[in-house]
Image (spheres, helix red, strand yellow):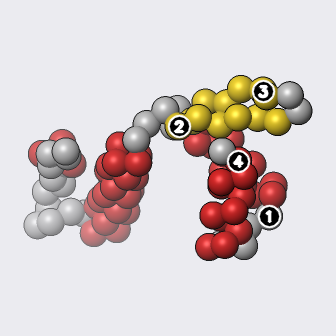
């Protein structure tokens, strides 16, 4: 799987090996990947589907944007609606 990441990320982003390893480590820490040793290599296995990961990223982005907006503007007309009222699928 790392070869897949290497190939795709180098095609799209021209990332160095250390950057790819950092990304894989962060995804593993967040519970999106697991890894196991296969000889002298690590085998990375996804623990969530692409759709689940994209939904997480959407929620994360909206939460950050909402916090940034509210910290700068004080919210809409003095009130601070939370993301709790938004339903994610």
Number of other residues with Cα within 10 Å of mark 2, as a class: few under 14, some 14 to 19, many 20 or more: some
Number of other residues with Cα within 10 Å of mark 1, as a class: few under 14, some 14 to 19, many 20 or more: few
Q: Quadrant of residue 58?
A: bottom left
In the picture, the disc for residue 16 is 1
* Label located before the other in sequence (2 or 4): 4
For label 3, the residue is: 37
Circles 2 and 4: CB distance less than 8 Å? no
Mark nearer the viewer, 1 or 2: 2
For label 4, the residue is: 2
- Whole-angstrom CA distance, mark 1 to mark 3, is 22 Å
Q: Quadrant of residue 69?
A: bottom left
Tag 4, which secondary structure?
A: helix
Circles 3 and 2: CB distance less than 8 Å? no
Residue at image x 59%, y 35%?
45
Mark nearer the viewer, 1 or 3: 3
Tag 1, which secondary structure?
A: loop
Where is residue 62? Give x, y as percent: 31, 57
In the picture, the disc for residue 46 is 2
Tag 3, which secondary structure?
A: strand
- Whole-angstrom CA distance, mark 1 to mark 4, is 13 Å
15 in relation to 38, above or below: below
* Label located before the other in sequence (1 or 3): 1
Circles 4 and 3: CB distance less than 8 Å? no
């Amino acid at each position: 799987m790392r070869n897949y990441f290497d190939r795709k990320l180098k095609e799209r982003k021209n990332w160095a090996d250390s950057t790819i390893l950092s990304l894989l480590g962060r995804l593993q820490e967040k519970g999106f990947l697991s890894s196991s040793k296969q000889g002298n290599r690590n085998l990375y296995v996804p623990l969530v589907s692409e759709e689940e990961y994209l939904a997480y990223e959407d929620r994360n982005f909206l939460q950050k944007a909402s916090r940034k907006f509210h910290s700068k503007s004080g919210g809409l007309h003095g009130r601070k609606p939370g993301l709790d009222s938004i339903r994610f699928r």
